[in-house]
Amino acid sequence: MSHSFSVDLGGLIDLLSEHLYSGPEVYVRELMQNGVDAIRARQQQYGEEFSPALSFDLEGDTLTFADNGVGLTPDDIHTFLATIGRSSKRGNIELIGQFGIGLLACFLVSEDIELVSRSASGTPPLRWLGRADGSYTLEDGPLDTPIGTRVTLKAREGRAEYLLPERVSAWAGDFGGLLPFPITANGVAVNENGVPWLDVSAGEEARRAAVMAYGTQLLGQPPLDFVDINTAAGGVRGVAFILPWTPTLERRGQHRVYVRHMLLSDKEEELTPRWAFFIRAVLDTQALRPNAARDALREDGNLRAAREEIAGQLRAYLVNLAERDPAALRRLIELHYLSIKALAAEDDTFLDLFMPWLPFETSAGSLALPDYLALGSQEHPEIRFSSDLNLYRQAAQLALPGQTPIIRAIYTYDSTLLARYAALHGGVRLTQLTHDDLVQEFSALTPQELARTATLREVARDTLLPLEAEARVSRFAPAELPALAFARSHRDLTRTREKLGGAGGGLWADLLGDLGTHTSEAAAEVHFNMAHPLIQQAAQLPDGLLLRRVLGMLYVQALLLGQHPLTTRELALLNTGLSDLIVDALAGAGTAEQSSLSQMN
Ligand SMILES: Nc1ncnc2c1ncn2[C@@H]1O[C@H](COP(=O)(O)OP(=O)(O)OP(=O)(O)O)[C@@H](O)[C@H]1O
């Protein structure tokens, strides 16, 4: 026996509202999309002259939306309107709708949908009343109904806020901002009526000014510039504004994408290349298709091809700018060099073009690569870099004679770029700095110095051992640096262990504790600098409290200078060391005062 499925409309509406649509306000978009499609269908099928228009009228808890599109015949109503999932538009790529579920969005805000329509084909007007329980009635409509469709909704309980005039007119303006015909809410226009980048009626200069004004309104301040986008795949037209600020990486994808002039999403990410952090695009596609939720484009071959074309146009803009207006390119790079670096890391042509401009953080300040290379040996050009931030910080404190500065390459792009640059320029050597490279530059002590520092070295070892630090004494530049500390990565582990221990321990603390005890290496390594007068003086002190305090505090100072996080024990060492020194100094000052007083008496 064969049976038919039946559909629970209430369940379907819940599904749409909870899982498919972003919020009940999408009913405004669905009404408008149907109106736009109907206007286009009337233009396509009947080719007649009429002035397309959409209007919202709001009074109390009632909304009436009207279009002067193609309208519906009695057959259309039974076939398309009353059958969920059936659409008259399937296969017509000129129209936006395709799934046959859009009108259901009206049930998100209203119990009933009243639709009065007169078809352009000449059939008499009809009034259809659809209810959320799945029933509908159809009767004759008023004879004075004009060609087109009028939909009336009455706010259901708890949804009145979605029919407030100011909210509806804001949504209508947002969704339909680019539509080339008027939309009104209670008689007031909500759109500007057109697409500024397509309007060439007043000449190119006026077009550019209008686009910049549009961008200024969009961004809240004038964009640096804009790039015209025009693709064959997907028929995408629009503009990419160059942001006048450096965007944070997580604030990517704020692009506005329209499908046939109707807003699809203001957070679209897929149509523009990943590296283009520096733009905010407004794009309108004729042929790319939305997904069923209507909040993003459907990923398909067409979308990928359009994305490639857009990437090509942005690239071409940058290349062109380098030739046309180097000062503008410099401004753009100042704000967006991370994005440009990401691009150059993928593309050798770009690498060559932009490398002279891109700044790198180095131990001699921010430098473009040619300026950096000019500082080193011309005979054996070398790029020295570190992708370990800790190591870089220590290296940056050192003045290594005759060495090219060190580049801080902690972003993945940086090391990729440097490697590609070195590969493209055969003569340039690329050196990744290691801890041993740095320490190799330190000079060992002379036998006399070794003898003189025997106590210092022993006390340093004893003092720092409980702090899991290994002490060394050598000589390095600059002489103004008394001590330099290298931390090994499991220092972080020690800190985590401390924190967890403090928070009550548990499994993690045990586990980390275990790891900690199995490691034989010291957590840090500190080098005291024999070139510094303080260390020379300390070497003359006998083993005692003062020497221990001095060494402990120099160690903590070295950690701080190297921007290493301090453990609680190190912090305590600094605190007691400081307060002891102050107490001593005050006691000394007191005695001096006493003796000068007694001398006066
Ligand atoms: N304002 C209108 N004018 C003329 N026909 C309409 C109008 N609104 C709806 N229809 C008809 O009702 C059908 C169903 O509309 P509905 O909005 O549910 O789906 P759709 O627009 O076809 O597809 P989608 O779910 O993708 O929006 C449409 O295919 C169309 O034939």
Image (spheres, rainbow, N blue to C red):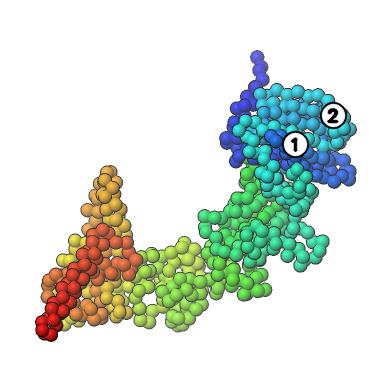
Q: Which of the 4 image quadrants contains residue 544?
A: bottom left
Q: Is residue 572 left or right of residue 144?
A: left
Residue at image location 70% in from the left, 45% down from the top: 169
The CA distance from mark 1 to mark 2 is 16 Å
Q: From the viewer's side, name the closer residue of 395 and 567.
A: 567
Q: Which mark is residue 325?
A: none
Q: Position of residue 503 (x, y in %)?
A: 28, 47
Q: Residue at x 60, y 57 (%)?
A: 273
Q: Residues within 10 Å of mark 1 (few under 14, many from 20)?
A: some
Q: Is 10 in front, or is 87?
A: 10
The answer to whether residue 420 is above or below residue 311 is below
Q: Is residue 298 visible?
A: no
Disc 2: CA contacts within 10 A as few (<14), some (14-19) or many (>=20): some
Farthest residue to the bottom: give it.
600
**Residue position marked by numbered label 1 in the rendering:** 64
Which comes before the other along the chain, label 1 or label 2? 1
Closest to the observer, 198 or 546: 546
Callout 1–callout 2 Cβ contact below 8 Å: no
Q: Which amino acid type is marked by label 2?
A: Pro
Residue 241, percent from left and from top: 65, 61
Label 2 CB less than 8 angstroms from ligand 1: no
Ligand 1 is within 8 Å of the C-beta of the residue at disc 1: no
Q: Is residue 276 left or right of residue 544?
A: right
| Residue drawn at 33 percent across, 68 percent down | 562
Work out whether residue 331 can be spotted.
yes
